Amino acid sequence: MKKRKLTLFLTSSLTALSTLFFAAACASKSDPGRKEINKNNNPSGGNKGDGSNDKQLNEFKSKSFEQAFNLKIIDELTKKPKDKSDVTADTIKNKYREIVQIQVKPEFAKIFEANVENVYGENDRNATGKIKFIISITNKTNNKAIYKTYEVGGFKTTEMGILDNGQLPSRTEKQITSSDLDKYINLNQQQRYDQDNKAYDELVKRSWENKSINEIRPDLNYSQSAANKFNELAKKVNIPTYESAAYKGYTLPKLKENGEFDGLTLYPWDKYAATPNFMSDIDYLGGRDRYKSTGLARMLPNEMYKKIALETFSVEFNWKDEFTKEIGEIDADIKNINEWKASKNKPKFDEYIQQFVDKKLEEIKELNAEKERMVHRAHNLDKQATGEKYDRQIAEVQKKIDELKALDYDKALEILNKEKNNYEIERKKPWNERKKSRRSFGTMWIMDYVLPENGKYPTKWYFGTNSHVAKLMKEPSLNAMSLTFINNKNVGIMSKFRITGMDNNFTRFSWAGEQMKESVDTVFDAIDYLKTSPTQYLSAGDKAKFNGVEEMIDFAVIEVDFEKLVKYNSGSWSNSQTPAFPTNAEELAKLVTNDYYHRDDKDKVKFLAKSYLNNYQAIDLKLKGSQPENIDQLFAVGYPSSKDDYFLKKYTDDDQISQKELWQSLWVNSDYRFYEADPVQEGGKPPFPESRLKNGNSLSYQIGLRSFTDKPGINDAFIVAPIRGRELYETYKDDESSNNKKTLAKYFNTGLQYMLRHYTPIGGSSGSSVRNQKNEVIGVHSTIFQRAGVDFVAALRSEGYNYQGAFGAYNLPQYDLIYGGGKDQKNSYLDSLIKKYKDKDIKTWLFKNGASKDNVPVEFKFNNSGSNRS
């Protein structure tokens, strides 16, 4: 029992020790103050200066590898020199720390020294005999350093590029011929899955180094005979086989020897890294560059995108942090380390440190993958600089790994106590002297408003977003909020915007003060929304491990009362100007919402009444030629951070690049190739045909995250990804034992999810609405999987799905997050309105006759006969 708790503890407290070394990286996302807190905690000290402007370094850097260095390879066993033609590039990649020595040539050695920071190679490295060394070069006269990547060839090659582990390297790209595509189109969706999944599973197994299921998922008690019952049911209900699902990391029933099920078991994220995932070739037909197909920045290709953009906002929250969680984790770390030290239990201490080492090794893998994407996307002038930026980051992570490995009991305790002391000093300061605050932002969109009286403009509005965005607003010390929005209803189609803070078409309003939080409220959060509990379906081991964890869907509704908010106006911004801030609540609401209230009713938001799981023919993408009018197009608009806006060009956009860390970029799920078109002058015609420009996008054909075999782009979150990111999702819930008190609780990701293709922007886009051409919202953009090239969209409605016992008693739940009424559903937006306003007879745009179950439109009512099978 103690060991199990320790494993959980290590997983949940990774931030405590890792932030000692990576606080700056964390701060850039959510905590500007952390960088200052941690700046003196580097155990090694002696940081080298930036040598990018050092003349001697740059002259040396211009030399080739052969001109600058001597390469020496040592046999790992005999320690004798080996010729590089006798060693594969894969061996160098995997064992460079043990067998590679790189020295500056004697004629330069008095001035320069070099160190190999990392080594990487392409998938075909054993076919080409080439590898890439990331080398830090230091000028010993001034201790300044630069990094350079050198490609070195001449290593031993193997037939077909077979790697050292005996496996063929994976290939994630494939050219599909026209004849192959015609054959593929003639298959039905199940046949397409069978063909794609066979090839996909081979890739996944190779990534697992052909390990058996019992090696990667010992928790399942797998045997082929025991899995037969599941596979028979899987075929009937169109879900992946047990074996395929196991390698993909799905939630699966634990098996008894007789094939009976012993509860569901989750993929052990606390022991293993993320499961392998690959892009779908089908998603990139028509010459699309898969690395650039993440959406379209700062352009609105058609009127539908424009309509959505005018009712979509970047929202930012600021709060003062008490550091309660961080201090608690540090205290637990200190207690454990002292116990291990007293008992001389070095293996436990090493296990503890290894958790952080493993996390950093995974970070290096992610940085290498991100480097590949970003270098590919970068403009030619920026490719080398982009690659070197990532090389420096990888080298820094490797240095931190070395520092972690060098820690002993006392050094770890010293760092932790220093960290705790800094937190304690900060939180003891009076409120007005507190310097450390956190900020984070997301996307939200107009969903509803309270109907006004006497011809007034509405001042109480409801905005849809993610639960994890609304969580920011629930912070007890919330003290500021801002909204950024398009201020010009006449913005042009196919015109290029600048980043939000540098474009006259955007305005940012801010509000601040300790009482400001009274103006905003999370009226509905889709947490613990069912009468059942997900743990009731789990195996005994997982039931104990996840005791008390409930379910969630990443959706929430925020209420903004402009009557109250107008009292806390604190600032405005529009491209270096400070526009007038309305002091009248109606004027403020009208300006922020772009006069949404006076739109024609047919142009206001609606919701999808029949999910695509239940009605897949409505979204079944035609793979060749123009799309029929009866096939839905999907549209998404959000505001990710501009820091990864790769559409910005060096020199041309230098002023924006210098400020991209501060602002957001409007982002849509459209074709990136539109950006390179010549700007459209007023009255002119765009260079693309109207048939392309009017389109939105569709669901993905990605295989690894699809749990319904005959329905591309759809999955059950609890089966495919019950844990959002690396840890259980945590947010505030109301404590029924205390008025107005909120406590943190953990939740599984659940419900129906859509997989959107060509829309994987970074942080800040969370909460983007996804809707069809009829302006029916189908869900909200929630989580991106860049390696798979897909985004998870939390569906607002599910009719449920009966797995006929494949997952024991578990079935995909039936729910409607707006109207409620699903089987076993206990909360929804409507339920929350009724609870909050009770007998006040509140009337909104969605519930014109009053917030009541009697006023749910008939098309959104369930028959409650149980979960249906699509």
Image: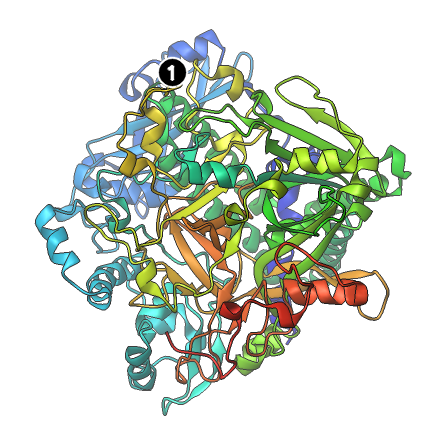
| Left or right: where 491 falls relative to 564 | left
Q: Residue placed at 72% from the left, 66% from the top? A: 834
Q: Quadrant of residue 709?
A: bottom left
Q: Amino acid at mark 1?
A: Lys
Position above or below: 760 against 7: above
So how many labels did they put on this image? 1
Q: Residue furthest top?
A: 55
Q: Position of residue 844 (x, y in %)?
A: 67, 56
Out of 747 and 343, give the one closest to the viewer.
Answer: 747
Q: How is the image coloured?
A: rainbow
Position above or below: 56 against 788: above
Out of 167 and 64, give the one closest to the viewer.
Answer: 167
Q: Position of residue 491 (x, y in %)?
A: 50, 27
Can residue 36 be seen by looking at this rendering?
A: no
| Left or right: where 31 falls relative to 347 | right
Q: Position of residue 136 (x, y in %)?
A: 45, 25
Out of 112 and 294, give the one closest to the viewer.
Answer: 294
Q: Residue placed at 67% from the left, 33% from the top? A: 591
Quarter of the image for the C terminus: give it. Answer: bottom left
Q: Position of residue 452 (x, y in %)?
A: 73, 48
Q: Quadrant of residue 24?
A: top right
Instruction: Please give the residue where the numbered disc 1 appears in the rendered image.
Output: 61
How many residues crowd around disc 1 within 10 Å: few (fewer than 14), some, or many (20 or more)? some
Where disc 1 sits, the SS reads: helix
Can residue 551 be seen by looking at this rendering?
A: yes
Q: Residue placed at 54% from the left, 70% from the top? A: 815
